[in-house]
Image (cartoon, helix red, strand yellow):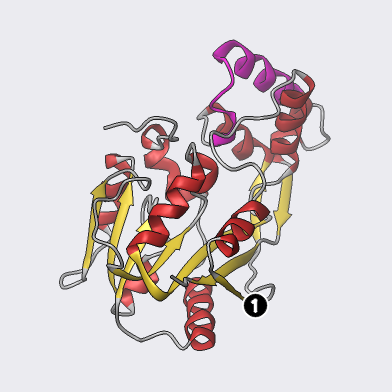
Amino acid sequence: MGFRDTSDYTPVAPHYDATRNIPESLLQLCYQRIFAQADFPRKGRLLDAGCGTAQVSLPLIKSGYGVVGVDASAAMLEIARRKLAPGDAAEFRVGDVRSLGEPDSSFDGVVVSKLFQHVGNWQSAVDELIRVTKDGGLFMHINEKGAFKHAVRRQFSARCRERGYTDLYVGIRDRSQLGAYLIAQGAAALTLDTQDLAWEKTITYGTALEHLRLKLHSEYWALPDEVYDLVLQEVQAWVRAQSEGENTVETMRPNLVAEVFIIRK
């Protein structure tokens, strides 16, 4: 099932967890800080909107929360289901985050990660998530910063911009707009420091090239095939010109970023 103006991760589902892996222990620490600061109950019903393979909600499920995950890709959801243990209170379903079909105020909180750049008319998705969240419930926007901006990807992006391809996402372009929109809808922002929730991630230029060959990065899916192939050839030539070529190793130090809001109605 497809949804209009929504990125569909089905083609990259088999590679997703291997290439976008946030340490679960850091997610657990992040949620502990959020819940302590918000005085959030230890049990409840949470929505994982755009859940993918349930990376960000799996720690919540293991902590005893009931989770409903919604995503546009059945293939991603099947991977999520395989992660569940007997007795886990979780359900994953195909759906459009702009039209959930859930009653008003049916969730104690919502968690979102890397969703709104992939959804056209992202404001309608935010409105829908507010609608299904209880007054006083949490809106948690979790992302990792600095996990993918390695040199090979920067080279690819620069060559896209040179050709005029600068607006590649179907949804939000500036993430600061999300917080401003939520506050305009009456939400209150919580201040949370997560800079210490960091880890090291290494990648070889050869692996980075393989990720591009597999088209794992959704921001480039809007490129015509012939343009994508040409840019890839140029980046491959750039890699081979480096002293260590595809064996070049780059180390990144990503950290978790959590934007947290209390919904007010």
User: Which residue in the rendered view is the most extreme toward the top?
Assistant: 226
Which residue is at a point 59% across and 20% down the rendered structure image? 223
Q: Nearer the viewer, residue 174 or 103?
A: 103
Tell me if residue 45 can be seen: yes
Q: Amino acid at mark 1?
A: Thr
Q: Secondary structure at mark 1?
A: loop
Where 141 sits versus 221, above or below?
below
Which residue is at a point 42% across and 61% down the rendered structure image? 130
Task: Please name the residue that numbered disc 1 is placed on.
Answer: 191
Image quadrant occupied by the N terminus: top left
Q: Main secondary structure of the magenta part?
A: helix
Query: Is 249 left, or right, of 37 in this rendering?
Result: right
Q: Position of residue 117 (x, y in %)?
A: 55, 43
Query: Is 65 left, or right, of 135 in this rendering?
Result: left
Where 70 sits versus 234, above or below?
below
Which residue is at a point 50% across and 44% down the rendered structure image? 122
Q: Position of residue 213 (x, y in %)?
A: 55, 27
Q: Is residue 32 magenta?
A: no
- Where does the magenta region start and end? 217-237
Q: Nearer the viewer, residue 89 or 180?
A: 180
Where 112 sits versus 64, above or below?
above
Query: Is 189 left, or right, of 132 in this rendering?
Result: right
Q: Position of residue 90 (x, y in %)?
A: 23, 65
Which residue is at a point 46% across and 53% down the rendered structure image? 126
